Structure formats: structure tokens, C-alpha cells
Amino acid sequence: MPSLPGPYHILLSFDLEEFDIPNEYGGCIDEPMQMQVTREGMNRLLPLLDRLQAKCTFFTTAHYAMHHQEQVRKLANMHEIASHAYYHSRYSVADIGASKLALEKISQKAVTGFRMPRLAEIPHDVLIRAGYEYDASLNPTLLPGRYNKLSSPRTIFDDQNLTIVPASVTPNLRIPLFWLAFKNSPLALFKFWSRQVLKRDGYICLYFHPWEYAVLEKFPDLPVYVRQPSGEPLLNKLGEYLHWLCGLGQFITMQDFVQKHREAIHPNLLATGARTLTRKEA
């Protein structure tokens, strides 16, 4: 796709969810501890975002938001609140619309975006019926044991009345620029990949989790590549990376980026309100 006009756009997002990942690897962590670990990570992360004035999108489970309503309301004043379903570990179709309503009630802002937990597939018509405008559940790469999306479009595209915002992957090799790659790659290499994406696409779409910035060494069931680094060392790495990105472009919420995309691609349709969009391959 052609780059959008203006400086590089940086789409920074965090999946604000219950810290249930140890249970995927045979652990047993109860809900109070799940919430505590996420809060610990948020307490480290938010001062960094404030210092950099980095607007981002928090894909939030309604379950987490119900337990942290004041925090979510404060986040909504600076950042975008989008939906990460109702619960992180269980799903029903009814939860898709219910999470949107719950998050809008708590944040007092419109919730237009969705990301499925673990980037699982979800029918686009379900999201459209629930009133979402965009979906950020696509990672167009191969992740063994999870998904193979190598044939999917690599950059933003439209499907019916829904805009799809894939997570960024490098051109050609499709190396994913997501949280595990950031955690386990030298920062210089991750910057090199990021520059490739920015030059080709005009924007970069990144996602992380607040719980990564808690101290995870106390959870031995987690694989080393998930557990280390974490806490302050990982936060320092993120801070250096985001500071570098600040010199290359501007942080923008996905909601605002999608609006810019729709205005650029479909100005006449937006003006009339008749938004019938067609799929465009990247």
C-alpha cells in the first residue's frame, strides 16, 4: 500500500489483560495473582509512556477493566481503549459485543477496535455486527504451533465494513515485530527490522503486554524466552527503543490511524456515510 502522507506513524499497543500465560505452560496462577502481576507491570510502564507523551492503544479485557475502572478511565484521557474480548482465557460470541459496551461505559469513550486474545481467528461479520470499525487480530507471519498467516496481507486493508490492521512484519521474510521478537532480539537488530518496515510501509504496528514489565523470574513454569528479560531491564530496553522511534515519527492511536486510512482511501464514501469497503491486498 502507499505510505500515508506525513511523518512515519507509530502504532504502539498493549494487551491489557489478566496475566494467565503461566497456565498455558502447566502452571496454576489464580485470578488475584493474575491481576496483581498486570498491575505491577502497569505501574512500571505508565511513567515511561507519560515521559515520552507516547499515545498508544490499550486492548483491554472487560474483565480487567471491571476490576480497575478508575485506571481505565484515566488511560482513556490520554490513550485509546479498545476491546480484547471480555475474558482472556474463555470466549463466547456474546462476549464480543458485551465487552464493547462494558468498556464504553467505564471509559466514557467510543470503543471502535478489537483484538482477539492470542490473535485467534474471529469472523469479521461478528465484529461488524457488534459495531467495531477495525480488527487488529492478524499477525501475518508463521508462528509454529499457533498460526500460519504467511498468505495474508502484510499491511492495512479493508474487508467489507471492517478495516484490518495487521501487526507489522518485515518485508520479504515476514519477521514479526511483536513482543517475543523484541524480548529475544538484540535491540540493534530490532531497530534494523523496524526501519525496514517504516521505509516500506510508512508506519509500524507493535504490540506488547504490561505484565512483561513485572518481575517474571518467580514463575518457573514460563519458558525462559517468555520469562527473561522482564521487569526493569526490559522496561529500559523498551524506553531506549521508544525514544529512538520518537526521532523517526509520531505516536498515533489505531483509532486515529484507521480514520486517516479511511479518509485517504474512501473520502467520498465517508462524506456520504455509505461505507462499503473492498478488500485490498498489500
Image (tube, rainbow, N blue to C red):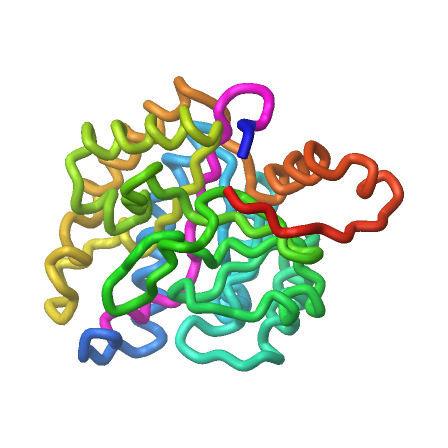
Answer with the quarter of the image where residue 15 lies. bottom left
Q: Is residue 75 magenta?
A: no
| Segment colored magenta | 4-22
Question: In the picture, which quadrant includes the N terminus?
Answer: top right
95 is higher (above) or lower (below) than 193? below
Q: Nearer the viewer, residue 209 or 34?
A: 209
Whether residue 122 is visible, yes or no, is yes
Q: Is residue 7 magenta?
A: yes
Please give the count of numbered marks on the rendered protein.
Answer: 0
| Residue occupying image coordinates x 37% and y 50% | 42
In percent of width and height, residue 190 lies at 24, 34
Q: Nearer the viewer, residue 243 or 204?
A: 204
Q: Is residue 166 left or right of residue 27?
A: right
42 is higher (above) or lower (below) than 131? above
| Residue occupying image coordinates x 42% and y 48% | 167
| Residue occupying image coordinates x 18% and y 79% | 26
Q: Nearer the viewer, residue 92 or 166?
A: 166
In percent of width and height, residue 31 lies at 35, 76
109 is higher (above) or lower (below) than 53? below
Q: Nearer the viewer, residue 112 or 163?
A: 163
Whether residue 112 is visible, yes or no, is no
| Residue occupying image coordinates x 35% and y 49% | 208
Answer with the quarter of the image where residue 261 lies. top right
Q: Is residue 105 left or right of residue 275?
A: left
In percent of width and height, residue 129 lies at 71, 69
